[in-house]
Image (cartoon, rainbow, N blue to C red):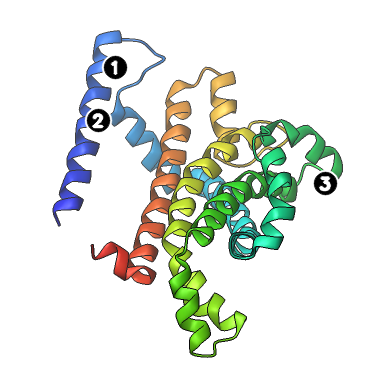
């Protein structure tokens, strides 16, 4: 209950600061929050904003999911198997620092301007975040846990299931929370051109038309999307990582 209250107070403080800045600047470029809220409610009510939010949510979730199902198994294997880590780590070392967002024009050339190219870029960027965190989590598991399972006659698959995955799960959830912010940020970029749908398109279109209320409505909607995804992950972590959250 205390945490919810703190979040509410923080949100209230941000709104007060926004209102104060809007009154102080007295500029069309910074409308008051209650004006944006009215526009947000109106556009949700008529369905125009809801459609774009559904599209953006699908793209973000699909990208995260695609990255998750590929990065986690690979990260567990690389972190746990020294021979594999020795061969794969140099490639990660070379590929991870690359600013993958610059690959968007190439991805569009290869896969077209549809949803897949946008999802693929989100997945590509989030993939390395999850991969590196999962690899490091699996690599740092104490050897005594493996010895105990081996003494009991556990197979390698059982060790992965009962030792490596549970021990790495909190790190994976941390990477997922970080990935939510990253995916929403990349979502804005991929929806800012070569599309006519999504919250990123609304933001750029409103900016081009100097419709600042709609601009802030789009920004607020994207912030709301990121916040909702973060809350869902937080709830999920409380459910599957109870031994960590309880501390």
Of labels 2 and 3, earlier in sequence is 2
**Circle number at residue 15:** 2
Which tag is nearer the camera, tag 2 or tag 3? 3
Q: CA distance from mark 2 to mark 3?
A: 41 Å
Callout 2: 10 Å neighbours few (<14), some, many (20+)? some
Q: Looking at the image, which residue sits at the far bottom?
A: 153
- The residue under the point 56% across, 45% down is 52
Say if 130 sits above or below 12 in the image.
below
| Label 1 – label 3 distance at C-alpha | 43 Å
114 lies above or below 231: above
In the image, what residue occupies the spot 71% across and 38% down?
Answer: 94
- Give me the residue at 56% from left, 75% from top: 160
Q: Secondary structure at mark 2?
A: helix
Residue identifier under label 1: 22
Identify the secondary structure beneath mark 1.
helix
Q: Nearer the viewer, residue 53 or 181?
A: 181
Residue ID at (31%, 64%): 244
Q: Residues within 10 Å of mark 3 (few under 14, many from 20)?
A: some
Viewer can see residue 208: yes
- Looking at the image, do the residues carrying marks 2 and 3 touch, with CB atoms under 8 Å apart? no
């Amino acid at each position: 209950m205390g945490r919810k209250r703190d979040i509410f107070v923080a949100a209230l403080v941000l709104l007060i600061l926004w209102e104060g800045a809007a009154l102080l600047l007295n500029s069309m470029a910074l409308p008051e929050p209650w004006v944006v809220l009215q526009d947000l409610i109106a556009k949700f009510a008529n369905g125009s904003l809801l459609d774009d939010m559904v599209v953006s949510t699908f793209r973000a979730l699909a990208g995260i999911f695609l990255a998750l199902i590929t990065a986690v198994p690979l990260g567990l294997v690389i972190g746990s198997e020294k021979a594999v880590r020795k061969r794969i780590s140099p490639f990660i070392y070379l590929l991870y620092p690359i600013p993958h967002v610059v690959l968007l024009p190439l991805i569009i050339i290869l896969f077209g301007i549809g949803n897949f190219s946008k999802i693929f870029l989100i997945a590509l960027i989030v993939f390395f975040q999850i991969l590196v965190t999962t690899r490091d989590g699996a690599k740092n598991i104490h050897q005594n846990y493996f010895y105990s399972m081996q003494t009991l006659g556990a197979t390698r698959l059982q060790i992965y299931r009962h030792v490596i995955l549970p021990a790495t799960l909190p790190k994976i959830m941390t990477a997922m929370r970080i990935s939510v912010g990253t995916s929403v940020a990349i979502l804005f970029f991929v929806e800012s051109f070569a599309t006519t749908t999504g919250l990123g398109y609304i933001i750029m279109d409103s900016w081009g038309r100097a419709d600042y209320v709609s601009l802030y409505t789009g920004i607020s909607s994207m912030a709301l999307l990121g916040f909702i995804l973060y809350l869902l992950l937080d709830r999920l972590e409380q459910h599957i990582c109870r031994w960590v959250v309880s501390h």
